[in-house]
Amino acid sequence: MESPTLAGWVGDAEGFAGRQWQREPAVFTPETFASPFDLDELDAAFDGGLLRTPYLEMVRSDKVVVPPDAYTTSRVINGITHRGFADRAKVVAQLRAGATLLLRCVDQWHRPTGELVERLSEEIDRRVEAFFFLTPAGGQGLAVHRDDADVFALQVAGRKTWYVHDAPAAADWSLGELPDDEHSPRRLHRVLEPGDVLYIPRAFAHRAVGEAGLSAHLSLTIRDISLRDLREALEQRLAEELDLPARPLGEAAITDACATLLGHARARLDAIGPEDLRLAARAARARRPATPTPAETFAETARDWEAGGPGVRRAGPASVGRTWRRLRDAARTTR
């Protein structure tokens, strides 16, 4: 596993791949630690005024539902009331009451986090997403649960106690909160300090409780192949080099299409091996962008516009006049 980003957190990335990756939870304390999102960036997001649901959520593990109106506010824009804008005073009040602030898909709206996610995704050839948790002392945002992802938790402020349990014993395991009778033996119990990095393998049950002060961590979730991905990849491979009319007319044509399709699928199945399918599924997953493709900035557009580059050039009054005179003179010469 060659990943400079992972190596910055775990040290020896190859050793990590052989010992811990998808096998064992572990805590690392890198010599240099820098999270792209911290409490200052959180304040900046609130100051910007555009943070809103569904990127913003407050959760509790004690089954108490925190309604959006308890931590958001509404605004009137062009005479229409829009709800769901983050309200810092309300959020702080909910934190004091024991709720956890959860910011979803930070990589979609915070550029430095998006750059980290894109870099890590390219290095390990998997889809990555980012979430931010802010938890008060004694607070627990989520009950014991399993994620369909490997998770790196980057502790950026305060202290948080983590409890990580075994992987599921059965192959057909479920996501989300675990019933009380399914709690497996504990594999890791550790208090994270700022600068620590926790790795939780996919499907390993876990929970976290805030310690002194406000505890904040950035979670990077790394998605792997699912049965749905394999099915979609198989369907794509079976359809390769298939030449059939999209809308066969009549029963005879439909029957012929069925026979051709079945024959093609059988031939393709004989040529597709498990490794081919795995690689196809992973390649298809990698092609789904985790973050939006960077577009030309407005500053670049403005420079191109003024310079007459690839963008659309603005036709100001002078150029409009020149164009009109050329058209007028051309009309006169054709008379």
Image: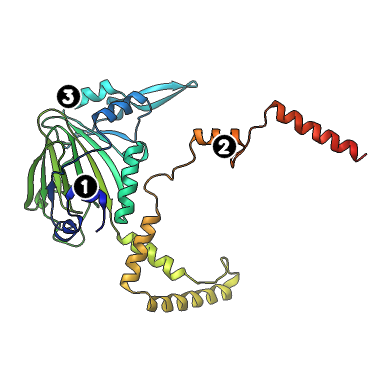
Which amino acid type is marked by label 3?
Arg
| Mark closest to the chain's N terminus, 1 or 3 | 1
Q: CA distance from mark 1 to mark 3?
A: 35 Å
Q: Residues within 10 Å of mark 1 (few under 14, many from 20)?
A: some
Which amino acid type is marked by label 1?
Gly
Provide the residue designation for mark 2.
304
| Mark closest to the chain's N terminus, 3 or 2 | 3
Which marked residue is nearer to the observer: mark 3 or mark 2?
Answer: 2
Q: CA distance from mark 3 to mark 2?
A: 51 Å
User: Quadrant location of residue 303?
Assistant: top right
Which amino acid type is marked by label 2?
Asp
Residue 236 vertical placement versus 79 (above, below): below
Q: Say whether residue 306 is visible.
A: yes
The number of discs equals 3
User: Quadrant location of residue 61?
Assistant: top left
| Mark closest to the chain's N terminus, 1 or 2 | 1
Which of these two is toward me, 14 or 108? Answer: 14
Q: Position of residue 110 (x, y in %)?
A: 34, 36
Q: Given the current orientation, which residue lies at the most extreme right position?
A: 335
Which marked residue is nearer to the observer: mark 1 or mark 3?
Answer: 1
State if disc 2 and disc 3 touch (CB < 8 Å). Answer: no
Q: CA distance from mark 1 to mark 2?
A: 39 Å
Q: Residue at x 16, y 52 (%)?
A: 204
Provide the residue designation for mark 3.
96
Residue 271 vertical placement versus 210 (above, below): below
Q: Position of residue 27 (x, y in %)?
A: 12, 47
